Image (cartoon, rainbow, N blue to C red):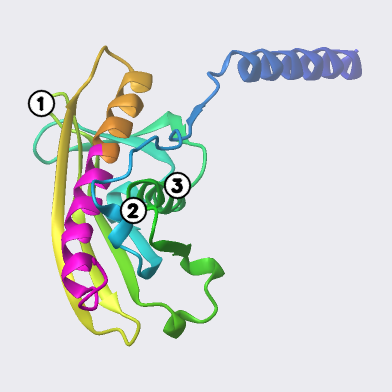
Amino acid sequence: MVLGLLRVMLVAGLAALMVACSSSPQAERYLLAAPQLSALQDSQHIDQRLVIGNVEVAPFLAGSGVVQARGNMTLHQASYHRWAEPLPSQLQRQLRLGLQQQLPAATWLSIQGSAHLRSLDYRLDISIDSFHLLANGEAEVSGQWQLRSAEQGFVDAGQFRQRQTLSSDGYRALVDALQLAWTGSMQEIAEALADTLADLAPAGDES
């Protein structure tokens, strides 16, 4: 009798567990779309060899969940809306593709595949300070870039900031807005680099 009751309780417990698991919400995972950018005017004169170095994100952005601010001092990292791969690796790949499209005469390499950094001309590092929803309902992407020589000497640096209004409510709209803001940031970076690299080009290269 007792054994039979234990069996019934065990079966009932397993059934309840299966129902709970099946009813748990599934996490949505997001991957940024590949950029589609046009070459900058006169970009054919920018032909240096560059490597995309570190793309670092602020610690509060380093988790897998999409982040939104809930007030001046409160942040929320979503449990069921996550990045499909770490945000730094997504942004590094996006940046390389976006710069290749805007400055196609230059050579752009990922640092993971660059064994001989000294054979290149410059290294570009990026720090991301914001890549999230602000408390006012806008998506913001901001940070700074730094250009160094192959010998690690400082060459130039700059900042970027883009805000984008969401087209609707929800995390899908937030990710779309972050994509647009990041695309605008890549355009900012490319335009600033074009000016810097044009000044660094040897005399006579634009003839």
SS category of the residue bearing label 3? helix
Task: Please give the range of residues in magenta.
Answer: 184-207
Q: Horizontal and vertical percent for residue 43?
A: 28, 53
In the picture, the quarter occupied by the N terminus is: top right
- Asked if residue 69 lies left or right of residue 176, the reply is left
| Image: 84 above or below 94 | above
**Gap between marks 3 and 2 measured at Cα:** 20 Å
The residue to which callout 1 is attached is: 136
Nearer to us in this view, 128 or 207: 207
Q: Which residue is drawn at 29% across and 61% down?
A: 45
Distance Cα–Cα, label 1 vs label 3: 26 Å
Q: Name the residue under label 3.
A: 90
Residue at screen point 90% across, 19% down: 3
129 to the left or right of 107: left
Q: Does 97 sit above or below residue 150?
A: above
The answer to which of marks 3 and 2 sits earlier in the sequence is: 3
Q: Looking at the image, is mark 1 or mark 3 nearer the viewer?
A: 3
Q: Does the magenta stretch include residue 203?
A: yes
Query: The residue under label 2 is which amino acid type?
Result: Leu
Quadrant of the rendering where the C terminus is positioned: bottom left
**Residue 49 image offset from top left, x and y in percent:** 40, 70
Residue at position x 29%, y 33% from top? 178
Q: Is residue 91 covered in magenta?
A: no
- Disc nearest the viewer among 1 and 2: 2
Q: Quadrant of residue 106?
A: bottom left
Q: Tell me, for residue 103, which label it has, or none.
A: 2
| Viewer-nearest residue: 94 or 199 | 199
